[in-house]
Amino acid sequence: MPGTLSKKLALTKERLYSLVGLAIILALVPVFLGFNFYYVLLAADVMLAASLVAAWNIIGGYAGQLDLAASAYMALGAVVTGHLLANFGLTPWIGMFIGAGSAVAVAALVGYPTFRFGIKEVWYALLTSALVVIMMRIYYLIYGSFETYIPHMEPEWLYLTFRRYEVYYYMLAAMLVIIIWVNLKIKDSKLGYYLAAIREDELAAEALGIDVRRYKLYALMIYALLAGLVGGIYITLTGILSFRLFDPWLGIVVAVMGIVGGLGSISGAVLSAVILRSIEEYLRGTIGATYPGSHLLVYGLIIILVGVLKPEGLASFIDYFKKKITRRGEEVG
Amino acid sequence: MPNPILRVEDVVKRFGGIIAVNHMSMEVYENEILGLIGPNGAGKTTLFNCITGVYKPEEGKIIFRNEDITGLPPHVIIQKGIARTWQKVRPFKKLTILEAVTVGALLRTPDVDEAKETAKEILEFIGIEKNRWNRLGSEITLIEHKLVDLARALATRPKLILLDEVAAGLRPHEMDELAKVLLKVREEYKLTLIVVEHVMRFVMGLSERIIVMHEGKKIAEGKPEEVANNPRVVEAYLGTKPL
């Protein structure tokens, strides 16, 4: 039907424009920051958090599984990429895909029995949280408490070694745009509809012919792939391989940011990651220095406030305005 | 007798020491509306869940269109053509009416736009107003929930729909409306319906044939008026007369 086709094109066009708009804004950020070393590093860090939260949105937001293992998949991608580079001199361009592949393999290995035995809700959260710790201990068993430093080579693209942080920032920003694009693609596809149905009511979803386990596993694997890739880029930035990369706290923070953003809303998730991560760093830089730890107190307070005032998350603001516009349009037409 | 579309043969389902369905057998014929009634705890819903694959029966067979479907998981059973609606509505709260029905239609096509078209046709056919299609599952009334539930099931293109207490909680005029929709739907989509129901007025008016269950067994079968006067049925519902 030509009518539906042109409508479909229009929709993707609209999304394409917003993605391009976002890319342009992200590209200009270092300029506004005056190419200041510290601020650009912070911006890269914010991009890292936003990328992880956007990847988490697939399993947490769309599929509704409270996954706390974002740092496990990210760190696995990071250490595989890092060790391939440090021990075998393999370029991170290939290494990050091997790393992400390993993350997908672990996700499939853990996810299959998890979903097969119907582990969900808080038990799923516990299980994924434990996964981070288990993987941390495994890394510790192999490499001990040593930190491996990736040898610092001459700046070049092949090994992703640079003297300035801008390149890393741009790579992570590009990753964020790609992950958002993947999110939008999923949302409009059969997979997206099925994941939403699973999130809302698993039993009803199954009665409509959805193989719940299979689709949850798909979501988990896509999420692990994206988180693994982010880890691969991240390690070229820090250059330090350590068991500390498997950070249970980070896994929880990613989920918290996703929830504060509003489950299932990609714009809310990214917005929340950008705002919360910036506030956290700002507070650490200001009051954190004079009263150690107090920045976490304020940070926690902000999260509680959002929880009390807007339990639906930041996305509900965005939705509210969107709906107002479309509903009004409908009534006129 | 025509060929049955669904045959339940000697099905047994136990929960611990309790036998919920006790050697139950029945046949359902193409294009009929069969009422399945019985007092609370008679095993109707359990039998339902055995047919739709939620439970696996311990004994017996379920044959659908000459194919043994005993013990298959729910998402496979619906592909074979058995859909169901829920006693307690199970809405997709954060999806719109149109999206919820689209989820059902996606069973038969991977293309979202095509599924949406199917969903629109079905919504129009069962009479949900166009201006309600963008309402979320959390914003609609009970009768709308029941209709959306039905539309969702219809969108999977079933041959047989099992309706679990579809009239529960509805006002009398809403029940009449629903009965009309069900008759219309059966005609249009060449469906067979099994109606599990507590509301006698609804099920007696709608069904062409009635099976009465009591303590996991079939105790009576026949036309609505025959069943209503059957002494065993009266006894099952009201108990025996004290001496």
Image: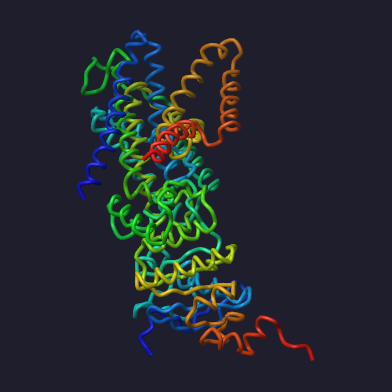
Q: Residue at x 43, y 24 (%)?
A: A274
Decide: is A302 above or below A251.
above
The answer to which of A258 and B85 lies nearer the viewer is B85
Give the quadrant of residue B219.
bottom right
Give the quadrant of residue B65.
bottom left
Query: Relative to residue B229, is residue A88 drawn left or right?
Result: left
Decide: is A155 above or below B111.
above
The answer to which of A38 and A96 lies nearer the viewer is A38
Residue A292 position within the rendered picture, expressed as x and y whole percent measured from the top left: 59, 15
Residue A180 position within the rendered picture, expressed as x and y whole percent measured from the top left: 34, 33
Decide: is A64 above or below B31.
above
The answer to which of A152 and A266 lies nearer the viewer is A266
Q: Residue at x 53, y 86 (%)?
A: B221
Q: Please identify the residue farthest to the right as the structure is shown.
A: B243
The quadrant of the image that shows the C terminus of chain A is top left
Query: Relative to residue A159, is residue B163 drawn left or right?
Result: right
Residue B42 position within the rendered picture, expressed as x and y whole percent measured from the top left: 60, 77
Residue B13 position within the rendered picture, expressed as x and y whole percent measured from the top left: 54, 76
